[in-house]
Amino acid sequence: MRRRGALFLVAALLVGAAPAAALGCGATPQAAFSRFIAAFNALDWPTFQGCLADSVSLFGPANPGALSLHRLDGRAAVERSFRAVFDAAAADGAERPGPDIQPENVLLQQFSGTALVTFEFRRAEHSFGRRSIVFARQGRTWRIVHIHASNVSESP
């Protein structure tokens, strides 16, 4: 009995020490989405990375400084794109760095091993962002396998 308790303690310590990328994003699609948005808003790079699947792809929005307007495939390319976003936000000099995305009109559609989350959020200068994020269950966690992002100007 004592040995089982010691093994449990060692396992708990190892999980606690594991990098966020190894832990995934969340046990449910809702939790994964919330964690992803919170990590993005806080510029929490390790947690953000943990939300991405190795096979992730991205259609990024047409923003100044965008690395590409074409689809990016794979963790390295997508991380490179988001790293530029994180670095620009951190260098912004704002009192509270980070994008402060507040999702509105959120729709989560769950299928057997995948989930699609679509939402909108307000942006500066009469525009709004539209996002579609596809999550896939990988073991006991959910990770992002695709992001499609666009920004639209509202008519006055």
Image: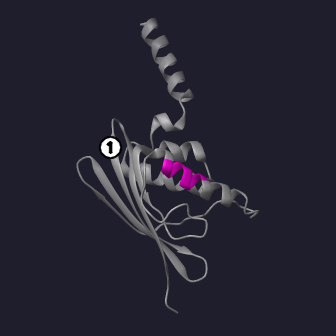
Disc 1: CA contacts within 10 A as few (<14), some (14-19) or many (>=20): many
In this rendering, would 114 be left or right of 93?
left
Q: Which residue is mark 1?
A: 137
Where is 4 relative to 152, above or below?
above
**Magenta-highlighted stretch: main secondary structure?**
helix
Indicate yes or no whether the magenta region holds residue 68.
Answer: no
For image coordinates 44% across by 54% down, the residue present is: 33
In this rendering, the answer to whether 46 lies above or below 88 is above
**In the image, residue 79 lies in the stretch drawn in magenta:** yes
Q: Looking at the image, which residue is at 61% across and 56% down?
A: 84
Rendered position, 123 above or below 98: below
**Front-lying residue, 9 or 49:** 49
Please provide percent x and percent y for residue 120.
45, 71
Which residues lie in the magenta part?
A: 77-83
Question: Is residue 2 or residue 67 the one in the foreground?
Answer: 67
Circle 1: residue type: Arg
Position of residue 49 measured from the top left corner of the image (x, y, whole percent)? 52, 44
Q: Is residue 21 left or right of residue 56?
A: right
